[in-house]
Each structure stands twice: as structure tokens, then as C-alpha cells.
Amino acid sequence: MITLAFDTCLDKMYVVLQKDDTILDSRVVENQDNKYHSAFLISTLQDIMSKNNIKPKDIDLIATNIGPGSFTGIRACVTVARVMAQQLGCKARGISSLEILAKIADNNPLVALDARKESAYLYYDGEIKGAIKLDKVKEIIANGNYTIITDNKLKTILNGISYQEKDYPLGEILANLAQNDSLESDWHKLKPLYIQPPPMG
């Protein structure tokens, strides 16, 4: 099975091409000049397939991050995944950034990402909990034995590990999670995970 996985929701773009259990290619793209990294998604997908002699019709599964994260990034990768899966007639699966980041932890992960308004997008005990006030998140952490995964902004408040401080293989994690056959794979049902509405203006 050939899987094409891509993620433009977080602070970098991840693109992975995988055949069965073998990673054929893995790319990380950062913001360049005044362009957000998602602007390079289509060209990166074309390049990674061309250099590995994979044609679009060869793809069996498209995997994408559905959020939370950058609203622009979420829209970009979910839209591209839906269009490609529709055109190619292949499976498409969405995985949340919270589930992806949870795999950084060795055990008992708690993922908290900045949701603004003194809140965090929270995941623990294997579930997405929503946008939770930071005071409540601190209570949950104090009462549990969690490996805390967060971002640079919330690390100063919650401690733990910031995913932004090390080059974790987030694209490969996404590709591997998406190969779970129990997950929904109909592109019609692939939708962004907006835990709270986009900022206005």
C-alpha cells in the first residue's frame, strides 16, 4: 500500500511518502520569506512523487492532519486531501494534531496546545477534550502522572516537552496512524477539526 501523508497545520509542513512499512521519502518545509509553508504543499507533493517514480494513480491512501492548528494550514491540507482522494478514487483519513503529538510521549501523554484566550486544546486519556482553560489544565496535570507535550508558548506555563524544540518525525507518525483500517476512509467525511471558531478579521 502506498500512503501519501501531509500536514500543514503545525509550525512546519510535513510530507511523507510510504510504501507498506517503508518510508520512501520524508520532507519538512518551513515558512519562507513572507510565505506560509502551506503555499509550497502542491509543489512539494509533485516533487516527492516525481523523485520516487510514484504516479498519483499509484496512491492507495491519503493521510492528513485535520487540526487543531493554523486555520490556514488546516484548510489547505484538508482541501487538498479531499480533492486528491476524490480525483484518484483512493482512501483518505484525517488524524488530529493532538493524536499525532501524543505519540512523542513514551507513556500516558497529555497534549496541550495554545488555543489563545487563556486556554489550551487538550488531549489526555486517549481523548480530545476540547479547548480548556489553563487553570483547569494545571489542575488536571497536578492530579495525574502525565507526560506533557506542548508548544513553546505553553511550555513556560505547563512545563513538559515542547514539540517545537526538537525535530520529531511528525509526518511519519501521521502516516503510520492513518494506516489503521478501523478509521473512516471516505473523503466525503474528511472535515477540518475546528474546536473553536476561526479568529475574525
Image (cartoon, helix red, strand yellow):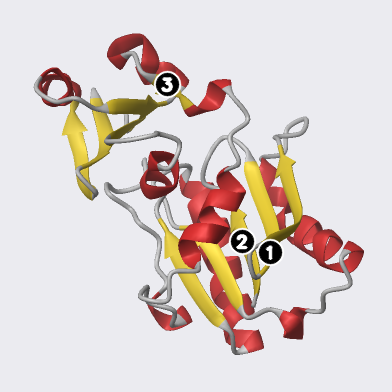
Sequence order check: which comes first, mark 2 or mark 1? 2
Of the pair 13 and 103, the residue shown nearer to us: 103
What's the distance in space between the residues labelled 2 and 3, CA to CA?
Answer: 24 Å
User: Please, what secondary structure does the residue beneath circle 3 have?
Assistant: strand
Q: Say left or right for 131 vs 67.
A: left
Quadrant in the picture for residue 49:
bottom right
Q: CA distance from mark 3 to mark 1?
A: 27 Å
According to the image, label 2 marks what residue?
A: 5
Q: Amino acid at mark 1?
A: Gln
Residue 8 at x, y = what percent? Answer: 58, 49
Q: Quadrant of residue 47?
A: bottom right
Per the rendering, the mark at residue 18 is 1
Residue under the point 58% across and 80% down:
85
Residue 46 pos. (x, y %): 82, 65
N-terminal-most mark, 2 or 3:
2
Q: Does 197 sit left or right of 90 as displayed?
A: left
Query: How many angstroms separate mark 2 from mark 1 (CA)?
Result: 8 Å
Give the class, few, some or many, for how many residues have Cα within 10 Å of label 3's Cα (few <14, many ≥20): some
At label 3, the amino acid type is Ile
Q: Residue at x 63, y 64 (%)?
A: 21
Q: Are marks 2 and 1 in contact (CB under 8 Å)?
A: yes
Residue 161: which numbered mark, if any?
Answer: 3
Q: Earlier in the sequence, mark 3 or mark 1?
A: 1
Q: Is residue 144 above or below residue 123?
A: above
Q: Tell me if residue 199 comes above or below residue 23 in the rendering.
A: above
